Image (tube, coloured by chain):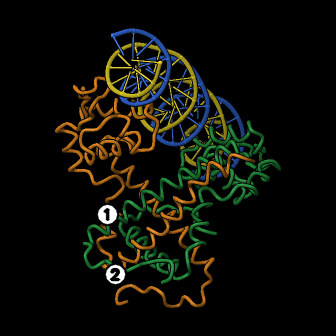
Chain colours: A orange, B green, C yellow, D blue
Amino acid sequence: MQTICIGNNMATVSKAHLIQDCMQSLRRIVKVLETYSEGVERRFDLTGPQLWALWELGRLGPCALKDLAAKMKLDPSTVVGVVDRLVHKGLVIRNPDPGDRRRISLIPTAKGQRILAAAPHPAQGHLLVGLERMDRKTVENLHGSLEVLVGVLEAENLEVPFFFAEE
Amino acid sequence: MQTICIGNNMATVSKAHLIQDCMQSLRRIVKVLETYSEGVERRFDLTGPQLWALWELGRLGPCALKDLAAKMKLDPSTVVGVVDRLVHKGLVIRNPDPGDRRRISLIPTAKGQRILAAAPHPAQGHLLVGLERMDRKTVENLHGSLEVLVGVLEAENLEVPFFFAEE
DNA sequence: AGATTATGTTTGCAATGCAAACAATATGCA
DNA sequence: TGCATATTGTTTGCATTGCAAACATAATCT
């Protein structure tokens, strides 16, 4: 209420217009995130998927390839290539799993961890700055709204295959 | 108030945690948008950039290649390939410009326009559905929060491209 | 006219991403 | 136990995106 003005002057604005504004805001956020990612890529000589994979490995700890692929919602055959490049750059090692000899454990090297410490989370940098500057009440509002939106979106998403199946 | 619960049970949650959640929500939204785009691609046999280019051409009217490239913030040599595929699919024609014989005018064909009429704006579909299902109060909250976020983000990053800036 | 600029294109390169086929290994069932 | 099946990682082949550099052609400036 004090620094940020939400909810006034709304009576004269149609819901459709609000929605249009939200769409535009989200697209601009996505574009800023992309642009930012590209900057990170140039600084650390890592592409977006590469940094993303490395970051997931940092979070997940030692991890099978299929789990990493599932986490990234990519095909394992795709992730093999990404991991290859990370291994080639010395940021990740493939560790054979003694228990199950089909499996490997993907583990960030010291160098990989140094990069993780230096690089912000993928595309997170500016967004974090922005969020941290928002007052708590606004963050709470955003948090709630986004959760609703994600909920609706992901529920909606489940219908996609059927929706597009018949035509 | 009735369907959506925002702002309670927040006292025990740290701001940092709220921020983490927001980040994750935004990432999931991005992922859903991507997935949705892929659905559109399958349905119309058009990739994301192809549909995007076609959509820009529908908005801009007859248009030089360099202008399309500028609008999409891509290199002209990249756009040549995208346009090639659109032309090959019979959705766009290259029209020689009588005034300046270096130039061409890119124009959607009737078939291209039919697709444009049938396809939603790139990646907009589900997000719109989601937003329209939210009650007005929640949309207002989201609108306000996103505006704050975009404001901070764009102040942070001056290189903010004009992306879907108009309705 | 001659130099410079603008426009579209081609070529060469790297990365993402999927599907299909493939070992190698583990697991389940008869 | 032994064979069929499933799982896991990988390889191969293909299409697409995307950029940089070199080019051809045409317009514009001096």
The residue sitting at 37% across, 89% down in the picture is A1
Circle 1: element type = helix
| Amino acid found under the numbered disc labelled 1 | Gln
* Chain of the residue where label 1 is placed in the rendered structure: B
Nearest the eye: A65 or B107: A65
Q: Report which residue position mark 2 lands on.
A: A137
| Amino acid found under the numbered disc labelled 2 | Lys
Q: Position of residue B128 (x, y in %)?
A: 60, 66
Q: Position of residue B166 (x, y in %)?
A: 61, 69
Q: Quadrant of the C terminus of chain B?
A: bottom right
Q: Report which residue position mark 1 lands on.
A: B20
Residue B56 to residue A28: above or below: above
Q: Are marks 1 and 2 on the same chain?
A: no
> Residue extending furthest right?
B110
The residue sitting at 58% across, 52% down in the picture is B36
Q: Position of residue B122 (x, y in %)?
A: 62, 56
Q: Quadrant of residue A58?
A: top left
Q: Is residue B150 left or right of residue B36?
A: left
